[in-house]
């Protein structure tokens, strides 16, 4: 589930140790962030294109995780699922 946080929500950012991956034309990168309570929020960046034609979709999720790695794994899995669903050819009915 995707959640938006109010601007006043305390979020401490930490660098991501998970390696980004490329799937088709998309580059998927987990961006977990430490929360004020010591748990971690899962964020994923899904980028495509280059230069002025580039886009970057960032999603954040309502679940929180005990470890940085758990949040990164979840974010990567969600990013991969999104790309696979988006890249799936449209089914046409006649």
Image (tube, grey):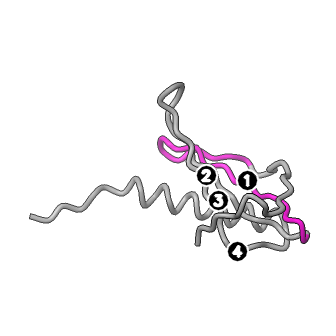
Local packing at callout 4 (Cα closer than 10 Å; few below 14, some 14-19, many 20+) is few
- Identity of the residue furthest to the left in this view: 94
Residue 58 bears which disc, if any? Answer: 2
Image position of 36 (left or right of 58): right
- Identity of the residue furthest to the front in this view: 8
What residue range appears in magenta? Answer: 19-37
Residue at 57% x, 43% y is 56
Residue 2 bears which disc, if any? Answer: none
Q: Are marks 1 and 2 in contact (CB under 8 Å)?
A: yes
Residue at 76% x, 73% y is 64
Please provide percent x and percent y for residue 78: 59, 64
Disc 2 secondary structure class: strand
* Foreground disc of the pair 2, 3: 2
Q: Are marks 2 and 4 in contact (CB under 8 Å)?
A: no
Please provide percent x and percent y for residue 87: 40, 53
Corner quadrant of residue 38: bottom right
Q: Earlier in the sequence, mark 4 or mark 1?
A: 1
Find disc 3 in the rendering and name its residue: 76
Quadrant containing the C terminus is: bottom left
**CA–CA distance between discs 2 and 3?**
12 Å
Find disc 1 in the rendering and name its residue: 31
Q: Earlier in the sequence, mark 1 or mark 2?
A: 1
Local packing at callout 1 (Cα closer than 10 Å; few below 14, some 14-19, many 20+) is many
Please provide percent x and percent y for residue 80: 55, 58
């Amino acid at each position: 589930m995707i959640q938006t946080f109010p601007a006043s929500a305390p979020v401490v950012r930490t660098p991501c140790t998970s390696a980004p991956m490329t799937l088709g034309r998309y580059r998927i990168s987990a961006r977990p962030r430490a929360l004020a309570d010591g748990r971690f929020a899962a964020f994923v960046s899904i980028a495509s294109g280059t230069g002025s034609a580039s886009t970057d979709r960032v999603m954040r999720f309502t679940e929180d995780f005990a470890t940085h790695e758990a949040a990164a794994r979840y974010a990567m899995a969600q990013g991969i699922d999104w790309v696979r669903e988006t890249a799936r050819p449209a089914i046409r009915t006649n």
